[in-house]
Amino acid sequence: MQTDNEKYNETVQPNTAFLNELKAKLPEFFTKEGSFDLDKFRNQLKDKNINELSEGYQLDFIGKDYARRQAGEMPSTVIVPDEKQNQGEGKDSKNLFFTGDNLEVLRHLQNNYQNKIDVIYIDPPYNTGSDGFVYPDSFEYSDEKLKDMFGLDDDQVERLKSIQGKASHSAWLTFMYPRLSLAKKLLSGEGIIFISIDDNEKDNLSEIMDELYGESNFITNFVWEKKKKPSFLNGNVGQKFEYVACYSKNRKKTHAFSVEQTERGKKYPFNNAGNSESTLTFPKNTVNFTKIKNNIIKSQDMSGGNIKTILLNDVIISNHKNTNAFSLKGEWRYSQDKLDDLLSNGAQITISSVPFRPNLVKNGGETKKMHNLLTLSHYPVGSNEDATKELMSLLGLNIFDYNKPSSLIKLLVKSYTYNMKHAIVMDFFAGSSTTADAVMQLNAEDDGHRKFIMVQKPEKTYEVDKETGEAKLDKSGNRIPTKGGKAAYEAGYMTIDPISRERIRCAAKKIRENNELTLPKDFDGSFKHYRVVKPVKQTLEEIEDFDPNNINLFTDMVDGFSSQTLGIDGDATGEETILTTWLAKDGYPFDANVEDVNFGSYIAHKVEDNRLYLIKDHWGAEQTKELLNQLGTHQLEVQSVVIFGYSFNIAELRELENGLKQLDSKVTLIKRY
């Protein structure tokens, strides 16, 4: 027997994710059978007098169709709560940390976090050849299945499989494409994504983002000065800079990026040499002539040097104010619409004397738009050296070679969330959780309540045999550390993710110590922890052999999803794992209020007077009778009952189905496998 998600994934095509998104936005162009009506769509474009054809080019690479298909698949994993952390230090936290493959985590979050993330920052592998990146997918499908799914011939299948374990451009593109596609769906309407990158894959990243997010949603490429002294590993030129690509979900909804506010009384000139010439009209009594009390200034050319200014009509000045409207022709920083908007909001405009050089006088506290050159002299962004020192001071050892300074990420997050202090910030290449550290620092500085979501794969710090999955051993029988994991391994960390979580704890402790008197009482310096893992082989075999028509159930299928059975820490029961996974699937946040409901000795779980979950086995006729009684007398109000199909035999299931159908109030039964 297959799980529901496995059945769905078998039907997924490369364009499934795209069609699902299209169906959600344009349902009127789909037939009853679910097919897209292209003729109707073309006719609608013609009716609206729109030319739907445009010239252009399309990004193409070996694994593109496979990557597109991955973006449409449902998760094949479960979400296991770390009950020790979640009921302990993280009990009241709104922050989240996921240990697992970020592609699977992104799939899980499509339902309960779609359109909710305000800022995503990621620092993915750069594919430099020295950063350890290789394409991780092992292509579990048979060659025949790959041919059928993508319409490939034998040579094309071999080309696709050739990227496995490689660090080619096609391998990197195939790896990044589905992750960036799913990330877009998580972004809120005004959400943005920052992506750190260097020259090696910068152009390929731009092409992916233009295709997935749209060229019109490109904000900028921030240029970050990563080193105080250049690196001369490049044989031709010293390297001092990297990039942070920035795209929006919908640029029309984004606001200005800013990390500073204007100073009170500071003057900003209207003239901007090099801009196109235009005419500005200043209404009467809107300009303060600071050095001219009473006079009539005749129309004239007031240009000088590289500044062009022509007064087009006479100005009558009385008591330092213009008593009539006047117009100036020149190269301006502001348009007429912007000038009118400034004046309607009480802006102060001054001209000292002839020649006229108008200035906007700031009241102070207004947003000052930032620029995209993130140099150490312009912004407090920090360098790679600062990142190393920072990690050393927190954890006592330098574990990561390519981590970013928290000051850089703090500046990026602040630049967009200065007026969004309840923003949700996500990083699905968490590394040492620098992003979480940056978010906590920013909250401590401006009394914010931003929440973070971190995702980190449990990468081994020692080498593993690809065939057996066992650790490689040296001549003395000891594990061999990976090239980049030696320091972590020697410090006792077998995987990267616990380092990431420890960084959060240490950073929170430091923030509390440094801000003891000013820190808000509700400062959130912890997190809830979840592991996203595949069920063990035995559980998968039991699922495969399960027959719902059996009268008796001989195996407790629920226990196969407990922390103990899955071989991980966390003290979660199988029931807690299944419930957590389903709550995410059904769109509930991880802090949803779950209430236990007793039916004799059987405990069910109710969420928001909406759904009742029946997961454990030993549901019988007595429990069905009690459930129907509570529903019929309105002691219990739910819209649907969701059951774990493996816990019910055919007789129990039919009795429950028939009973719910006889109720006056409609309650839907949802069976899941």
Image (tube, rainbow, N blue to C red):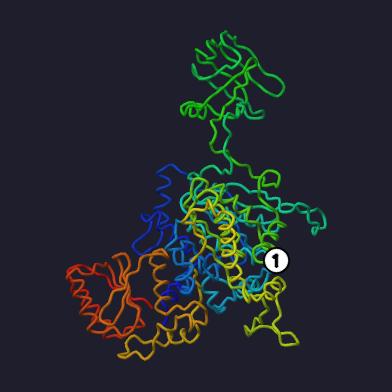
Residue 94 on image: x %, y %: 46, 61
Q: Is residue 534 above or below residue 243?
A: below
- Determine the image quadrant of residue 514: bottom right
Residue 532 on image: x %, y %: 50, 73
Label 1 belongs to which residue?
Answer: 398
Query: In the image, what residue type sits under mark 1?
Result: Asn
Q: Is residue 410 above or below residue 474?
A: above
- Determine the image quadrant of residue 596: bottom left
- Quarter holding the C terminus is bottom left
Residue 36 on image: x %, y %: 41, 59
- Determine the image quadrant of residue 154: bottom right
Along the line of sight, which residue is nearer the eye, 271 or 650? 271
Count every numbered label the image shows and give the total: 1
Q: Is residue 81 above or below residue 113?
A: below
Q: Is residue 474 above or below residue 251?
A: below
In the displayed orientation, state which residue is furthest to the front: 517
Instruction: Report helix, strand or loop for mark 1.
Output: loop
Q: Is residue 111 left or right of residue 292?
A: left
Q: Is residue 314 left or right of residue 7?
A: right
Along the line of sight, which residue is nearer the eye, 568 or 188? 568
Residue 243 seen from this side: yes
Residue 557 on image: x %, y %: 40, 84
- Quarter holding the N terminus is bottom left
Q: Is residue 531 left or right of residue 24?
A: right
Residue 76 seen from this side: no
Q: Residue at x 53, y 30 (%)?
A: 363
In the displayed orientation, state which residue is furthest to the right: 235
Q: Residue at x 41, y 76 (%)?
A: 576
Along the line of sight, which residue is nearer the eye, 200 or 481? 481
Q: Residues within 10 Å of mark 1 (few under 14, many from 20)?
A: some
